[in-house]
């Protein structure tokens, strides 16, 4: 049996955007619910396109958007590459989902929390921690929280299961995302023993996709590979440029500043170059955004 990776746009949306039971299990495992009463009982899918109330405001699309029995909303996204603007994009989309709950004259007490779960197939922070939980807290006393928005970022390349019994379903779902791919011929038995994971695995069987879908899948990964290779080359050049500028300045602080500025500038310039080439080939802006991390409106302006 041959399988596809669940991290691709095609497969991720098929698994988590078409099966409410799977995305329910996924969210319950990965979101920081503190007690069983917080867990999702059932949910319904919502339009992934966050349409503004007026045509002058920005439109945006997410991978999966759904609502549970309490009215809480959940946004789930798979992001292939990290960019400095991605957090702002996540904040924008979650905020839009939050405020869109109320019609004119509605009571603020009717607002329900919005959770944004972001799986990132890239690294963006120092250290080995892969799970990042953001909320609005009081600086002096972090127990004081303004509820409403919560953001989870998971750096998939950093995930390694240290204890298979610790948060078992979270470990199983992250192993599903990181271990199943085109090279998989036999799925680990402990994954198949779980009903939800087993069902999610069957959605990745190559035989379940049409020839056109498989061609699109291969093209997706070709674009990701090309983009990463070009950005890696750009980062090396930026690093060398930063080191040279630091040497000329003769100061350690200057070296660090020059290195960081050169790295960031080179990374963004290279992503714009890649996006421009993809757009010339007729690739949809949504897909370009997923691969490069650039905002859709920035791609449209290219």
Image (cartoon, rainbow, N blue to C red):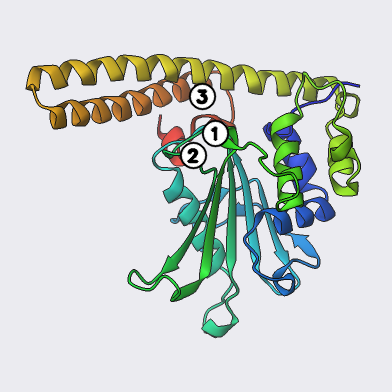
Note whether 155 is above or below 143 in the view shown.
above
Residue 70: name its quadrant: bottom right
Q: Secondary structure at mark 1?
A: helix
Give the labeled residue for mark 3.
Answer: 279
* Quarter of the image where the N terminus is located: top right
**First in sequence: mark 1 or mark 2?**
1
**First in sequence: mark 3 or mark 2?**
3
Q: Residues within 10 Å of mark 2 (few under 14, many from 20)?
A: many
Residue 54 showing in the rendered view: no
* Quarter of the image where the C terminus is located: top left
Residue 10: name its quadrant: top right
**First in sequence: mark 1 or mark 3?**
3
The percent position of residue 112, horizontal first and vertical second, equals 60, 74
Give the labeled residue for mark 2.
Answer: 296
Give the labeled residue for mark 1.
Answer: 285
Residue ID at (74%, 44%) = 164
Residue ID at (51%, 24%) = 279
**Depth order, front residue of 182/226:** 182
Q: Secondary structure at mark 3?
A: helix
């Amino acid at each position: 049996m041959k399988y596809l990776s669940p991290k691709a746009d095609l497969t991720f949306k098929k698994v988590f955007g078409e099966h409410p039971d799977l995305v329910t299990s996924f969210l319950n495992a990965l979101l920081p619910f503190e007690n069983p009463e917080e867990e999702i009982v059932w949910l319904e899918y919502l339009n992934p396109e966050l349409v503004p109330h007026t045509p002058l405001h920005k439109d945006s699309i997410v991978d999966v958007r759904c609502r549970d029995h309490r009215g809480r909303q959940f946004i789930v996204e798979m992001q292939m590459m990290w960019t400095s603007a991605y957090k702002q994009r996540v904040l924008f989309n979650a905020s839009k989902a939050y405020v869109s709950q109320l019609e004119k004259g509605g009571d603020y007490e009717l607002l329900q929390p919005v959770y944004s779960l972001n799986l990132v197939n890239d690294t963006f922070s120092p250290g080995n921690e892969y799970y990042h939980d953001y909320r609005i807290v009081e600086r002096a006393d972090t127990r004081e929280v303004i509820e409403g928005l919560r953001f989870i970022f998971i750096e998939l390349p950093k995930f390694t299961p240290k204890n298979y019994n610790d948060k078992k379903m979270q470990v199983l779902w992250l192993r599903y995302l990181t271990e199943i791919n085109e090279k998989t011929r036999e799925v680990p038995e402990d994954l198949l023993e779980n009903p939800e994971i087993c069902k999610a695995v069957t959605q990745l069987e190559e035989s379940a996709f049409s020839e056109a879908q498989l061609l699109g899948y291969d093209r997706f990964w070709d674009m990701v590979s090309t983009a990463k290779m070009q950005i890696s080359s750009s980062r090396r050049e930026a690093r060398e440029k930063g080191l040279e500028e630091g040497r000329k300045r003769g100061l350690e602080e200057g070296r660090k500043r020059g290195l960081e500025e050169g790295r960031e500038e080179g990374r963004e310039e290279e992503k714009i170059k890649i996006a421009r080439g993809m757009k010339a080939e007729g690739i949809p802006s949504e897909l370009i955004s997923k691969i490069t991390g650039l905002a859709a409106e920035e791609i449209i302006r290219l």
